[in-house]
């Protein structure tokens, strides 16, 4: 819904207009932006992991004390267990992943104003879209002027000042007062820039300016008084000399007309016919001022004489039909919510493939006050809601959210601020939108194109899945970090501790972070938009299964094999303390095997259903260079004596390197076997029962 104002505001504008603006501003400020699904899920993940980590740490403290470990070592051990279970790099990795998603969205002609919105886009289940500029091109031109003398047809190109005009001389003569009055009520202009005629200001008013050029009209000067457009009145008026000119929606102007040489009922039928053809219809009227000048819109807009109708075309975007079908394929419902005439909205909905039945064309007057009734009425794909007031748009967002939807709402005007603030994703128009709309939004479309919304939803889904990917990656590492502590505790200290607290921190913060960020930059895979919206828990059953039952144990076992191989080859016996630097070498073997296994784990986590052979090794360039960098950092921690000494490790012998070398291969083979088993048992559409994850190439 657009907020139309003249470019020549008057100091005598009525008090109702600033009061209306103030009311909308207060309504916008009173709306509390909903917490994003990602924020809710991150809080849940943090609470879950923190509870598990602290509980496990306390439990193993008790175990260590029961095993007659001295208090200092028992506390150190408990801290190590707790640290091992906390993915320290998770939060910065999430932030970097969202930033990468925002960067990619920017390349798709949209600007993200709040990082969390990147993920929320992937959870969208209902899009409430405006018509003008989003589903249409917002390239308006007056194609018909209807008066009692007949219809004048205009065929031009955009905002060019020349056009082919069809109609009798009398018809053209009768159209001149209509164009004059409409021009007087318009602030937008058509201007020539770099050899092209483009709109300056409101495109609809620029089209009226272009009409004045095409009719070679002698245009009036600035009006003496302006009563601006109000979304409740849906019209505006100006005082020009001793005449009042009024321009607005036909169903709001015609009831105010009393003097005319045409039957107003016939005019209303003509207006409906024009709207049914997809034209935006404006009625133009006037009256002569007798006595005192009006001081408010109510005084000005009465006892009018009907002059004529303007029919403006705004072609549908060719890409809109495909974008709407993509939404349906993705399980997203779409509704058109507009301030336009219902017949115009229905016609455009039919042209772009949105409308699925005339019974779904509603108006603001049809919307009940009861939330349950309203939800049942509008919670359908393809519904068209016309003549909507700002308060109703806000109510629509709230009702859909109450029914469990993640709502994206588009808007471009001051009126749309409250609804944009309330929606889970407020989407403002960058080309035609107001500053108020952009300020209240989460996403700004630089090209005002509905197709761009679909592209951002695709990226949002990819980002949600990326969070699951690197959460799996982190938790797998945590299992390998916890395993030696558990073995040491259960053996009562008879088995040497393979990994220390500082080594755990080094793995989490130094070697894992860069690779996790690369996983966060994974591009959306092919079928991400052929599935329902991403939803459910980040720490889903699929993530837990793959981390704690498949990948984590495999990595832990391979690292322990490397540790044992070094100890045994060095002559260690059970229950004895490894001699000399043997423990440091064995610990180095465990450390480097975990790092090597994480290289394979990074490739395995790129999809929960596809093996690396099907994904392609080089389709994530960030991962290709991040893995060797992480390995280089790990080698430095093993071979640089000061670092190795602080961490309590040393370069392992050949047997340790051999196990580390095969660890990523073994992990990828186990991963491929698990994916094949799960695919046979549960099918491509369900990676794991109850997981809520997307299957196929998307996961």
Image (cartoon, helix red, strand yellow):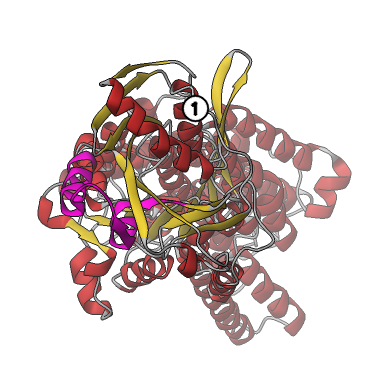
Does the magenta-highlighted stretch encompass residue 265?
Answer: yes
What's the residue at 21%, 55% (across, down)? 383
In the image, 537 versus 213, the foreground residue is 213
Q: Residue furthest right?
A: 642
Q: Main secondary structure of the magenta part?
A: helix
Residue range in magenta is 245-274
Q: Secondary structure at mark 1?
A: loop
Residue 556, can we see it? no
Count of labels in the image:
1
What's the residue at 17%, 41% (across, down)? 273
At which x and y percent is residue 144? 30, 31
Position of residue 313 relative to residue 289, above or below, is above
What's the residue at 17%, 43% (across, down)? 680
In the image, 128 versus 538, the foreground residue is 128
Classed neighbour count for the residue bearing mark 1: other residues with Cα under 10 Å, few (<14), some (14–19), many (≥20): some
Q: Quadrant of the C terminus?
A: top left
At which x and y percent is residue 246? 44, 52
Does the magenta-highlighted stretch encompass residue 179?
Answer: no
**Mark 1, residue position:** 217
Position of residue 85 relative to residue 260, above or below, is below
In the image, 550 versus 535, the foreground residue is 535
In the image, 699 versus 74, the foreground residue is 699
Position of residue 224 relative to residue 641, above or below, is below
């Amino acid at each position: 819904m657009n907020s139309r104002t003249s470019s020549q505001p008057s100091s005598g504008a009525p008090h109702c207009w600033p009061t209306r603006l103030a009311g909308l501003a207060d309504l916008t400020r009173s709306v509390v932006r909903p917490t994003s699904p990602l924020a809710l899920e991150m809080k849940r993940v943090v609470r879950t992991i923190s509870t598990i980590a602290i509980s496990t740490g306390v439990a193993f403290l008790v175990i260590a004390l029961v095993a007659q470990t001295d208090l200092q070592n028992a506390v150190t051990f408990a801290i190590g267990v707790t640290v091992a279970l906390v993915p320290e790099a998770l939060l910065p990795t999430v932030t970097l992943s969202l930033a990468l998603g925002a960067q990619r969205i920017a390349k798709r002609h949209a600007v993200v104003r709040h990082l969390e919105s990147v993920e929320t886009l992937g959870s969208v289940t209902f899009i409430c879209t405006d018509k003008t500029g989003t589903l249409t091109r917002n390239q308006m031109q007056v194609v018909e002027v209807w008066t009692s003398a007949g219809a004048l047809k205009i065929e031009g190109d955009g905002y060019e000042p020349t056009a082919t005009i069809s109609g009798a001389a009398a018809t053209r003569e009768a159209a001149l007062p209509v164009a004059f009055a409409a021009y007087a009520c318009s602030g937008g202009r058509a201007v020539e820039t770099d050899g092209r005629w483009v709109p300056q200001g409101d495109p609809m008013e620029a089209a009226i300016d272009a009409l004045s050029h095409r009719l070679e009209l002698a245009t009036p000067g600035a009006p003496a008084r302006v009563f601006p457009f109000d979304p409740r009145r849906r019209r505006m008026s100006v005082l020009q000399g001793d005449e009042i000119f009024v321009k607005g929606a036909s169903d709001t102007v015609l009831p105010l007309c009393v003097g005319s040489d045409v039957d107003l009922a016939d005019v209303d039928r003509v207006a409906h016919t024009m709207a049914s053809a997809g034209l935006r219809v404006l009625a133009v009227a006037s009256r002569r001022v007798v006595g005192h000048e009006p001081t408010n819109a109510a005084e000005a807009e009465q006892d009018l004489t009907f002059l004529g109708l303007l029919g403006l075309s705004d072609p549908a975007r060719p890409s809109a039909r495909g974008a709407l079908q993509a939404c349906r394929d993705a399980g997203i419902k779409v509704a058109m919510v507009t301030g336009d005439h219902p017949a115009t909205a229905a016609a455009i909905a039919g042209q772009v493939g949105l409308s699925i039945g005339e019974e779904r064309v509603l108006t603001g007057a049809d919307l009940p006050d009861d939330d349950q009734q309203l939800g049942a009425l509008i919670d359908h794909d393809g519904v068209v809601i016309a003549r909507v007031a700002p308060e109703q748009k806000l109510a629509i967002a709230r009702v859909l959210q109450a029914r469990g939807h993640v709502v994206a709402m588009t808007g471009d005007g001051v009126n749309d601020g409250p609804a944009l603030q309330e929606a889970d994703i407020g989407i403002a128009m960058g080309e035609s939108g107001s500053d108020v709309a952009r300020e209240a939004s989460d996403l700004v479309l630089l090209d005002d194109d509905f197709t761009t919304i679909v592209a951002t939803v695709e990226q949002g889904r990819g980002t949600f899945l990326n969070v699951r990917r690197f959460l799996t990656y982190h938790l797998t590492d945590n299992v390998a970090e916890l395993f030696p502590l558990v073995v040491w505790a259960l053996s009562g200290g008879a088995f040497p501790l393979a990994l220390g607290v500082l080594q755990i921190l080094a793995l989490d913060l130094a070697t894992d972070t860069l690779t996790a960020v690369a996983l966060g930059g994974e591009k959306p895979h092919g079928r991400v938009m052929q599935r329902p919206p991403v939803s459910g828990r980040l720490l889903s059953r699929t993530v837990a299964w793959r981390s704690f039952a498949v990948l984590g144990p495999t990595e832990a076992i391979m690292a322990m094999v490397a540790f044992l191989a070094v100890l045994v080859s060095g002559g260690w016996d059970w229950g004895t303390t490894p001699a000399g630097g043997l423990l440091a070498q064995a610990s180095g073997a465990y450390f480097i095997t975990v790092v090597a296994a994480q290289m394979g784990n990074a490739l395995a986590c790129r999809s929960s259903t596809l093996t690396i052979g099907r994904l392609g090794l080089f389709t994530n360039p960030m991962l290709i260079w991040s893995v060797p960098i992480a390995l280089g950092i790990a080698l430095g921690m093993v071979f640089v004596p000061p670092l190795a000494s602080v961490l309590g490790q040393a370069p392992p012998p050949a047997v340790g390197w051999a196990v580390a070398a095969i660890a990523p291969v073994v992990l990828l083979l186990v991963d491929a076997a698990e994916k094949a088993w799960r695919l046979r048992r549960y099918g491509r559409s369900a990676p794991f029962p109850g997981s809520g994850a997307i299957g196929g190439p998307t996961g």
